[in-house]
Amino acid sequence: MQGARPPRGSGGAAPSGVEGAEPLEDGTGRGGGGEETQPFRHPTHGRIHRDTPITFTFDGTAYQGYKGDTLASALLANGVIQTGTSIKLGRPRGIFSAGVEEPNAVVQIEAPFPEPMLPATTVELYDGLVATGLPGQGRLATAPDPARYDAVHTHCDLLVVGAGPAGLAAAAAAARSGARVILADDRPEPGGSLLGTGEHLGWVTETTARLDAAPDVHVLRRTTVFGYYDDNHLLAVERRTNHLGAEAPEHVSRERVWRIRARRVVLATGAHERSLAFADNDRPGVMLAASARAYVNQYGTLPGRHAVVFTTNDSAYAAAMDLATAGVTVEAVVDTRPEPGEWAERAREAGIEVLTGHAVTATEGAPRLTSVTVAPYGQTAGRREFAADLLLVSGGWNPVAHLFSQAGGKLRHDEELGTFVPDTCRQAVEVAGAASGVFDLARVLAQGAAAGARALEAEGYTCEAPSLPQVVTAPQTPPMQVFTVPGREGAPRFVDLQRDVTVDDLARATGAGMRSVEHTKRYTTAGTANDQGKTSGVLASGVVAELLGVDVSALGTTTFRPPYTPVSFAALAGRDRGALLDPIRTTALHEWHVAHGALFENVGQWKRPWYYPQDGEDMETAVLRECAAAREGVAFMDASTLGKIEVQGPDAGVFLDLLYTNMMSTLKVGMIRYGVMCRPDGMVFDDGTVIRLDQDRYLVTTTTGNAAAVLDWMEEWLQTEWPELRVHCTSVTEQWATVALVGPRSREVLGSLAPRLAVAAEDFPFMAWRETTVAGIEARVCRISFSGELAYEINVSPWEALALWEALYEAGAPYGITPYGTETMHVLRAEKGYPIVGQDTDGTVTPQDLGMSWAVSKKKKDFIGKRSFARADTARPDRKHLVGLLPEDPGTFLPEGTHLVAGSVLPAPPVPMLGHVTSSYRSAALGRTFALALIKGGRDRIGERLYAPVGDRLVPVTVASPVLYDPEGARRDG
């Protein structure tokens, strides 16, 4: 069962002794390795397999446990209770619970394969397990995970979540109906809280056997349902071989994600026991009462020798008496209620002292608990101190309403129970047992059976009443709602153990004006760790309500979001991982680049040459050399990855006029025009060139990463807004290989290989294109420059790309032709102030912000984004403009993303920011560093000094025009 029902059961006879060592004198709680060194193992209790010993290692020390243990239960049996330190304060932390709600004992599995941030309470023990304790954060594996993962889809008429008493009863009621039933539980065996109480286990075994034998029932063990979505679509993860360690079969997936579509759902997810915020409540040895009971009854492990029980409700009495029966000396039961009722009398009859109307006000012990101080509730006088190495706490029970809330369910506060319980839900879902706020076992069983039958009868099935055990209802006294307990001054009272959040932290949040639990959660981080506040969520709400002086029912709880427990990325990916998931795209020239030492960067799915280091060169040296070649001689690059889309049809010009901010229909055949696309909000979406091939045929180029998005954009508008336009769009990116030939000597190189092409400036002007042969290869040559130099883009069939490239390399050899990569391309274009969409834009930038008002037509009646340019916001003078930045020290490099401020001294936070650096490089042509930046009112600040915080200093910079090289364009025009 997901969660644990508050245990109900009777105590046994008077305490009996157990052979075994006392707690270690040094207080460390550390034990040794073999069976004889399990001093806290009970000789007969538990459901572990004592005939199958298991050797494991924790924090470098070897220990022994048994099959059926969790890592936590085996550590406790060996006398180890401290598992690490807290994430913020570094305080020692010990095992706190026995299930998924564990906030303290978070471990890193080191072998057989590294996996971080796992609760030791849920890690099943296997031979060869190696683990280390964590201070709230772990390490990812550095090697690929060799395990397999998969996913399946399934349908059922009824999904029962949780195989505790309510879930088993619900599934049993549905088993013979003929309906398809799935019972999912996160534990290795059904039974839920009954495994921890030791009650009615015969009924559990019989019912489980009948369900396993039923042809239409599928029992999923070790399966956590972690997400509940629309139309009864639920996700679950099954841990199939995690518990086998190195013995796991290679052909069986380690974890499997189940995607379940259910007609009806019964949530029997149980409840989590709640702690209390009292002084120093985080010491190793402080544990939830029901969890301690589970360690004794299910695992045969004694969490300590001398215990004090601190409670606000009846459930902890059963835990106290079970521990006493197992040989633990229960020093006292401390109950905040003045009149606890019959359970207190039973405890006294068992020889346990009961202090009514009292509370725990202090604890001592480092690193393990050594004593507990008790006083009348709300008072400091009359204190008593008990020597104890174990303090069991029960502040009430919180129904596990996570999935219910994910399904759209609403919670209400139950005043008698002092917690939030499910109220109404918009989906076909039933809630049964402790998850609904019912804690009496007889009622839990009856409610579970009724919920299963009711769910299927609504679908037209007939159910039979299942066989249920006879349960004697124990007398109950209402719990007392308590969240905080006064303690000694200065002692921390922890609310969220995993985040080190205290009552004082929440007080600071409310003192800062926070009035919502959602706000205090984010202010303090309470409930944001990987346990998601399972033991601290409602406690935090109660503390905040007390601090604000409001009723907790009005304050409510934080939002429950999936996943219920952490799910590995590997499980979510399943088989969709590795190199085959996202194809690697390479150009026709890729092997040449590899052979000539290129290093690559990923641009979208493409592998693009980044730079070509020669012997002894680092990246900076190589890029400066490539830049110098492009500016002073000739260089060439593989530009094949640019997106290319043919737009054809009688209305192609009309369509492009609507897509681009500038006019495209007036473009003459044989010419090229730069264009900008905007979203409907007027913000830049992409840019590129448009080549007119014929009267009704254009070739559009896009940025490499946006090629697919632009084609999708075109199709969306054609199909949804302008279906009357006679236009077809076809991606031809892979049909053309493109080589950019750049530099003042590029005309000579091209002319030597294309004798039929008139390459003079007057014959072949900038932004024109020609069809010709280059090195005997049919080619489309465009006079386009993204570098600011005389440049050509030569487009050929990919099959001819290598021949063209090698011909250019040979013809350019006398001029020192140099291949260059994307980093050099970025430097060259930035020197000219050419923006890269996605780097110098961020979704909030208009063409006007980039200084491209000239690219926004004032003649066209309409285009995408035109109306947005009339908004007052897009005309504000303080909008961020793209400008250049020159550090006063020409050798100072500004990291990209660096913020810019006006003054030479940083004011107190919040610091007003003027903008940020979008691109930053070292320039061979300028002989210095420079940057591009988006700055508020940037064009009006040209010549002004600003400051950039870099490390611990403020670097003075001068705002400049974004065009820092050849502003007249003489070199580009040739």
Image: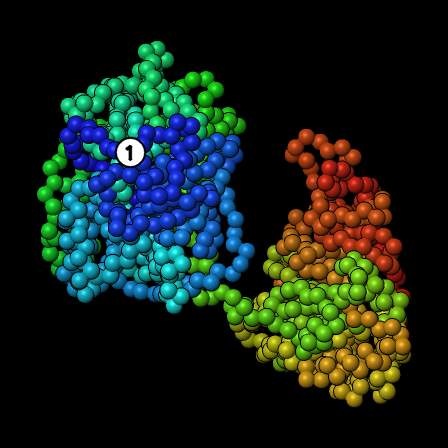
Residue sitting nearer the eye, 752 or 219: 219
The secondary structure type at the circle numbered 1 is loop
Residue 304, given in percent of the width and then of the height, sits at: 32, 31
- Relative to residue 32, is residue 961 drawn left or right? right
- Relative to residue 391, is residue 787 drawn left or right? right
Q: In the image, what residue occupies the spot 31% across and 32% down? A: 21
Residue 800, given in percent of the width and then of the height, sits at: 71, 84
Q: In the image, what residue occupies the spot 38% across and 68% down? A: 251
Residue sitting nearer the eye, 417 or 269: 269
Image quadrant where residue 214 sits? bottom left
Q: In the image, what residue occupies the spot 17% across and 46% down? A: 201
Q: In the image, what residue occupies the spot 83% across and 57% down? A: 923
| Residue placed under numbered mark 1 in the picture | 20
Residue 488 shows up from this direction: yes
Q: Amino acid at mark 1?
A: Gly
Label 1 neighbour load within 10 Å: few <14, some 14-19, many 20+: some
Q: Is residue 860 above or below residue 438?
A: below
Q: Is residue 782 above or below residue 333?
A: below
Residue sitting nearer the eye, 630 or 939: 630
Residue 212, given in percent of the width and then of the height, sits at: 20, 60
Q: How is the image coloured?
A: rainbow
Image quadrant where residue 229 sits? bottom left
- Relative to residue 593, is residue 236 drawn left or right? left
Q: Is residue 358 above or below residue 3?
A: above
Image quadrant where residue 722 sits? bottom right
- Relative to residue 23, is residue 43 drawn left or right? left
Residue 973 shows up from this direction: no
Residue sitting nearer the eye, 626 or 847: 626
